[in-house]
Amino acid sequence: MKRILGIDPGLLHTGWAVIDVKGSERKYVASGVILPPTKLALSERLAFIFNGVSELCETFQPNECSIEVIFVNKNGKTTLLLGHARAAAITAVAVKNIPVFEYEPNKVKKALTSIGHADKDQIYKMLTILLPAAHPKTADESDAIAIALTHANMSRFI
């Protein structure tokens, strides 16, 4: 059995999900969102994300991690800030010696729906079919589950 931690990074909301994989079987374990207080300085938010992901690694003991690659935004500053949040999450996993795999948003969408530009609603519907026990409450949580599922499906080819 393999345990995968999926992460949808964000400075305000970092979605996370844990699934177990055995052959073609996928089992939902847990998911949620790390919410750094908005009043914190950037460095403190990054530490909050780092500590939150570190705690997830300790609690759930994943074998592998999958994380979304940043898409280049029209606003360069936004892209750079998102990169900081992503780096905090990746570092938290990497210091635990857990391999990290990265997936572009369109590959995640295509892996789950066969449509590279699927919308959030289509992703959510597929998640409920593939993992009936999963009931994500936010888009960030749903995206993290999708990223974990993508890795479960793609890791056969790695």
Image: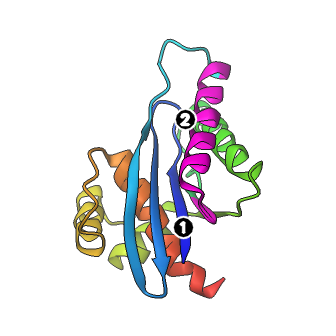
Q: Which region is colored magenta?
A: 43-66
Residue in the picture at 33% in, 75% down: 113
Residue at horizontal 71%, vertical 60%? Answer: 98
Precedes in sequence: disc 1 or disc 2: 1
The front one of 88 and 20 is 20
Residue 75, numbered label: 2
Could you say which quadrant of the image residue 80 lies in? Answer: top right
Give the residue at mark 1: 3
Position of the N terminus by quadrant: bottom right
Q: Nearer the viewer, mark 1 or mark 2?
A: 1
Specify the quadrant of the image occupied by residue 112: bottom left
Q: Is residue 12 left or right of residue 52?
A: left
Element marked by disc 2: loop
52 left or right, relative to 99 = left
Label 1, secondary structure: give it: strand
User: Residue 119 magenta-drawn?
Assistant: no
The one nearer the camera, 86 or 64, is: 64
Mark 2 surroundings within 10 Å by alpha-carbon count, few (fewer than 14), some (14 through 19), many (20 or more): few
Of residues 56 and 138, the one drawn nearer to the viewer in this rendering: 56
On screen, residue 17 above or below 138: below
Which residue is found at the position 48% from the left and 64% from the top?
148
Farthest top residue in view: 39
Q: Which mark is residue 24?
A: none
Q: CA distance from mark 1 to mark 2?
A: 35 Å
Three-letter amino acid code at the position of disc 2: Asn
Name the side, left or right, on which 88 lies relative to 82.
right
Return the x and y of residue 20 as percentages of the image width and height. Answer: 47, 70
Q: Position of residue 114 (x, y in %)?
A: 36, 79
User: Where residue 142 sits in the image (x, y, percent)?
Assistant: 34, 54
Q: Main secondary structure of the magenta part?
A: helix
Q: How is the image coloured?
A: rainbow
- In this figure, what is the number of numbered marks? 2
